[in-house]
Amino acid sequence: MALQIVFFSIFFFVSFTIAQGVRTLNVRNYGAIADGRTDNKKAFLRAWNDACYQNGGSIVYIPKGVYMVGSVEFAGPCRGPIMFLISGDLKAPNGPYSNVEKWIGFQHVNNLIVKGGGTLDGQGPSAWPYNKCQKTNNCDPLPISIKFDFVTNSRIESIRSVNSKNVHLAIYGCNNVNVSKVDLLAPADSPNTDGIKISRSADIRITNSRIRTGDDCIAIISGSSNIDVSYVYCGPGHGISIGSLGKYKNEENVNGVTVRKCTLNGTDNGVRIKSWESPYAITASKFLFQDIFMENVRNPIIVDQTYCPHSPCNQETASHVQIQDVTYRNIWGTSSSQVAVSFECSKKFPCKNIVMTDVNLASVGGEGPLKSSCSYVKGRSFGRQNPPPCF
């Protein structure tokens, strides 16, 4: 049903273009200057508002050139479908510019297409030295490069993001969104530069994309359901993660996540589920990791329910996140760590119904045979298993 909605939306946009003509709004006609220095926020907003408030379909067009633009929010609801066509390169202001959640945002929009082949340059190197969030919880996060809030029946494609100050692309409160052919790039040591972060969203599909960054390539967190990730190349980075979960009060369950036909190369983790030791109870369930190739990956398969990347860590209570109904199927490649499969589950809420079928990993570390490690987990294994399973 969700796919039918997307196809209908695309068909409607194309049919409208052919039948009636779509108005194209070139940001240069609104005063945008492609000199890489002038702040074009007002020009972009004027073009967006004209597109949003007219009946029928519109294209907001950013032609080739380098456009500096300050933090900007493109808000709806709008009267018709909109294509935001980025052929040029967008450049964020230098420095950390705190008290700003995002650099570019889209909010409360239905039938949106963001595409074009242009580049979003977050100017991360000018801000990363000011990032304190890797060392403490008491910090002001740097801006996300592009964020979608409460966007529905939409797609994001052929976008390139480099050197984001924080997360490259965030999806919050969205429904029925396709992400494809995105290229997200930041150095391996860049702090908190997750590729795609999804929260409180449903029916999200990510496919045919390349993510090379300094944190999770994809992070799926609180309140997400029916997420499909396929044909994604990840590395460097921290892998493809569900979590972290259980850090905050009022988090919501995560369920129905499929990760398939992906490649992870040189990442710190492969496929990971992580939760904090806290009293906040949610369920994380119905996950499928299938047809995944690992090359020189540390921790190819890992569940970590004692996650705490920096002190202080609360070890007085076990994680209250219940992980269950997780399947790993046809996962192969090489591990750079001797413990290639690790389930460190909650002693209060043990992982249950974990199924492993045809896991075949080889060592590249020269530390001897690969091992599995298990704590508080109930599961079954079938087919070929290397390393030997621990349940």
Image: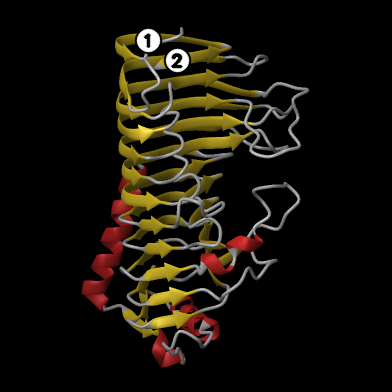
Asked which quadrant contains residue 290, the reply is top left
Is 97 left, or right, of 193 in this rendering?
right
Q: Quick check: 194 left or right of 7? A: right
Work out whether 211 lies above or below 374. below
In percent of width and height, residue 182 lies at 34, 57
Reading the image, the residue beneath label 1 is 388
Question: What residue appears at the point 42 percent right and 45 percent down from the top-left corner?
Answer: 204
For label 2, count other residues whose C-alpha is less than 10 Å away and answer few (under 14), some (14-19) or many (20+). Answer: some
Q: Amino acid at mark 2?
A: Ser
Answer yes or no: is residue 104 visible. Answer: no
Q: Residues within 10 Å of mark 1 (few under 14, many from 20)?
A: some
Which amino acid type is shown beneath numbered disc 1? Pro
Name the disc covering residue 372, or none: 2
The tag on residue 318 is none
- For marks 2 and 1, the one nearer the N-term is 2
- Report the residue at 52% width, 30% height from top: 273
Q: Secondary structure at mark 1?
A: loop
Q: Residue furthest left?
A: 18
The single residue placed furthest to the right in the displayed view is 316
Indicate the secondary structure of the residue bearing disc 2: strand
Which residue lies at the image location 66% right of the left edge and 33% below the top edge? 246
Q: Are marks 2 and 1 in contact (CB under 8 Å)?
A: yes
Q: Quadrant of residue 121?
A: bottom left
Label 2, label 1: how far apart the Cα atoms are: 7 Å
Residue 75 percent coordinates (x, y): 54, 69
Which residue is found at the position 43% from the left and 21% from the top? 338
Nearer-the-camera pick, 111 or 64: 64
